[in-house]
Image: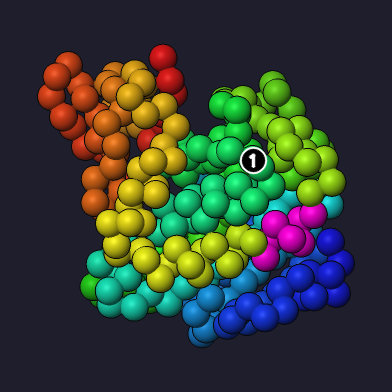
Amino acid sequence: MSETQFRNSLRGLPLGGLRYFSSIGSTNDEALAWAAAGAPDFSLVIADEQSAGRGRAKRRWFTPPGAALALSLIFRPTPAEQAQAGRFTGLAAVALVNALQKYQLSAQIKWPNDILLNGKKAAGILTESVWLGGKMDSLIMGIGVNVAPASVPPAEGLNFPATCLAAEGPSDLSRFELLKALLEEILLQRAELASEKFLRRWDESLAFRGQAVRVWSENSAPLTGKILGLQPDGGLRLDVSGAEQSLHFGEIHLRPL
């Protein structure tokens, strides 16, 4: 991905600013530093390669050159959006699901932050927020998408099956076109972030809906239940032995039974 191609692909989008790197440690780290220095709302950091990309729990995110999308968006949430902070991961997920539909790729959201194609992980989302007192100063939305086969990590290093867009759909899919489609969808979905319509789109895209799953975190015993849907704040509703329980964001792992 050359910088010229990258910039040309984003013409017409209302970006607050943009930074392109042929190689970087982590786009989220760069975005956090830029946000602290005053980056405007909807500023974008994107890299052709990440050497220290990370997902949740500081797990490494594999981003070889020329094979994936690795980007981070900086948000300056309005007071109304701060009240919907739990929906920002869903914002990225719904936007990516919708963007992939344009390429006849039917994706699902593995709560809370993975995108699946045919039951295999093709993308991940990492949101990080900075608070000043009781106000959210900025939110960083990191998105990594496996596009070409080289972006799929070795199987022995995975804790969930992985795939790439080229393996599941068009082999000639353009990263530049996908990037623009994704950003356009984020803008559209952001405008409806607080609405029931947005929550319904997110809910309807959930993977394993109505199925039994096992859910656990590093500090709790596994919980088994059936996915019912989402809470208004984006928490997951589970039927556990006939009683409804809600799970909220954190270092949570989810696997189908």
Q: Is residue 26 visible?
A: yes
Which sits in the foreground, 225 or 27? 225
Q: Is residue 58 visible?
A: no
Is residue 103 depicted above or below 12 in this figure?
above
**Image point 36% across, 56% down: which residue?**
198
Q: How many numbered discs?
A: 1
- Is 112 within the magenta? no
Q: Is residue 11 left or right of residue 143?
A: right
Which sits in the foreground, 222 or 124? 124
Q: Position of residue 47 (x, y in %)?
A: 74, 62
Label 1 crowd (10 A; few <14 / some 14-19 / many >=20) = some
Q: Amino acid at mark 1?
A: Leu
Is residue 37 depicted above or below 70 in this figure?
below
Q: Is residue 136 left or right of residue 157?
A: left
Looking at the rendering, in which quadrant would you find the C terminus?
Answer: top left
User: On the image, which quarter does residue 135 sit in?
Assistant: bottom left
**Image point 65% across, 30% down: which residue?**
162
**Residue that carries the numbered disc 1 in the rendered image:** 105
Please name the predominant secondary structure of the magenta segment in the image: helix
Q: Position of residue 130 (x, y in %)?
A: 39, 68
**Image point 60% across, 54% down: which residue?**
99
Q: Is residue 6 left or right of residue 135?
A: right
Q: Position of residue 145 (x, y in %)?
A: 66, 47
Tell me the magenta residue range. 174-180
Q: Position of residue 133 (x, y in %)?
A: 26, 75
